[in-house]
Amino acid sequence: QVQLQESGPGLVKPSETLSLTCTVSIGSISNYYWSWIRQPPGKGLEWIGYIFRTGSTNYNPSLKGRVSISLDTSKTQFSLKLNSVIAADTAIYYCARYVGGGWNYFDHWGQGTLVTVSS
Amino acid sequence: EIVLTQSPGTLSLSPGERATLSCRASQSVTKDFLVWYQQKPGQAPRLLIYGASSRAAGIPDRFSGSGSGTDFTLTISRLEPEDFAVYYCQQSGTLALTFGGGTKVEMK
């Protein structure tokens, strides 16, 4: 059973960089896309972006320029960096596995981690 | 980007009743790459339906998905107490993945 676990600071100051890591509990990250999704408290879901094992990425156009996702296959981890954060970036951040190449869906999710942007 | 509009915002029903949730896309969803998730308070979303109508592993057959193009429906044939939750649709027919705003199914 694939398990994902987010980790990182729960509080980030405005204008700084939000950094999160997702650890995947399987032998290798392969043939899937590894994604970040966020959810402001009490609101809906917003896809942030994903990365493939080759390093190829795809980001939400609304966040492009501020976001980057990287992959460390040796550690079966992938990371999110969101620059120049504002209060509106306060959300629960989920990492998830995205099954592409056909049906295209998120089938495994982390439990989520709340990140608050505040001074 | 494809905008997904879910309706109604809230559905108040009793256990045993039928729930019909709608997801309308601003443009046709390629190859019916339309997915439904269930989210309970304090939990991550859970995959229910993919490809508009295929149930994910372990999902009871009271959940069914239908539709194509721009209009999609999630039906719960007989609500069980554990089905009261928020349901989201999501499209992956374009590079910019998007979610609908959600429908809350609450107990009447």
Image (tube, coloured by chain):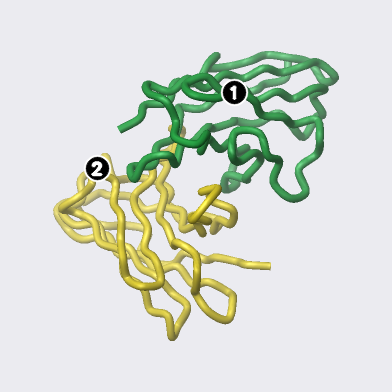
Q: Between residues A9 and B47, which one lies in front from this camera angle?
A: B47
Mark 1 falls within which chain? B
State the SS at label 2: helix
Q: Secondary structure at mark 1?
A: strand
User: Disc 1, disc 2: CB below 8 Å?
Assistant: no
- Residue A91: where, in percent of width, then height? 38, 45
Q: Which residue is situated farthest in the front direction here?
A: B31
Q: Nearer the viewer, residue A11 or A112?
A: A112
Number of marks present in the image shown? 2
Q: Residue furthest bottom?
A: A74
Residue A91 higher or lower than A1, as above or below: above
Q: Which mark is residue A18?
A: none
Left or right, B35 with respect to A113, comes to right
Q: Position of residue A42 (x, y in %)?
A: 46, 33
Residue situated in front as seen by the camera: B108 or B6 = B6
Residue found farthest to the right: B16
**B18 shown above or below B68:** above
To which residue does mark 1 refer? B67
Chain B shade in the render: green
Residue at the spot 64% in from the left edge and 25% down from the top edge: B66
Q: Residue at x 27, y 49 (%)?
A: A117
Which amino acid, mark 1?
A: Gly
Tell me the residue that label 2 is attached to: A87
Q: What is chain A's hue in the picture?
A: yellow
Q: Looking at the rendering, which quadrant does residue B84 occupy? A: top right
